[in-house]
Amino acid sequence: MIHHVWGLLHHPDAEWHKISGEHESVSHLYVHHVLVLAVIPVVCALIGTTQIGWTYGGSDTYKVSITDGLALGVAFYALMLMAVGVVGSVIHWLARKLESRPSRRNCIIFAGYIGTPMFLSGVFALYPALWFCMLGLVIGLLYSAYLLYKGTPSFLGISHKRGFIISTATLCIGVLVLEVLLAVIVLLWSMGSEYSVVWWFFG
């Protein structure tokens, strides 16, 4: 399981060729990669927000109750799983005018592996300070963009010149959709902590 993680981080060119040659199914991608990695940010966020608490730059911290944390964690997990499929479908739609248009399956698989750094950057949520989580988000985003540019030509069967154009003009949009969805979930975690404070104050 998740045996492509190290390769994508250490030698992405070779790993993209390896992944492409496996002709993986979407269900296999989810079972052996996405379902496992998506647990990382959920568990880390659950621990961080319930045991340490959100901080927005000051000395005050705002904790989420275990009940609220579990509910938010389930929503977080479900939306991340959905985001991979959405991003893959967006990539497939945006590539509709390509002569050698990649299949929807390949686009979803591509999106799942591009999201690997974002899943791993979820460890930053163990310490849910806003600046620290933003740092993790930026690191994950930058490496996801790197995987995008490295993987587009080889994995989607596009020339390097066309791959650069498509990566910039279309596939980046798909990755940004994933980042926006993840950012929304982070906001939900912080809102959950704020609701807990309001309930405690007025309750």
Image (tube, helix red, strand yellow):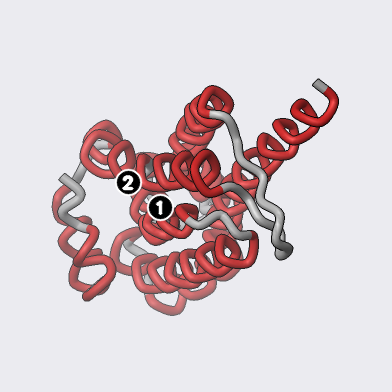
When the figure is inspected, residue 63 is found, relative to residue 61, above or below; the finding is above
Could you tell me residue 21's position as x and y percent?
15, 55
Could you tell me residue 54's position as x and y percent?
62, 50
Hey, which quadrant is residue 31 in on the image? top left
Which label was assigned to residue 154? none
Residue contact between numbered discs 2 and 1, judged by CB atoms under 8 Å: yes
Q: Amino acid at mark 2?
A: Leu
Q: Which quadrant: the N terminus?
A: top left
Q: Which quadrant: the C terminus?
A: top right
Q: Residue furthest bottom?
A: 161
Which label was assigned to residue 119? 1
| Spatial separation of the CA atoms under disc 2 and disc 1 | 6 Å
Packing grade of label 2 (10 A; few <14, some 14-19, many >=20) is: many
Residue depicted at x 23% and y 74%: 10
Residue depicted at x 14% and y 50%: 22
Q: Residue furthest right?
A: 202
Could you tell me residue 91's position as x and y percent?
51, 50
Q: Amino acid at mark 1?
A: Phe
Residue wearing tag 2: 37
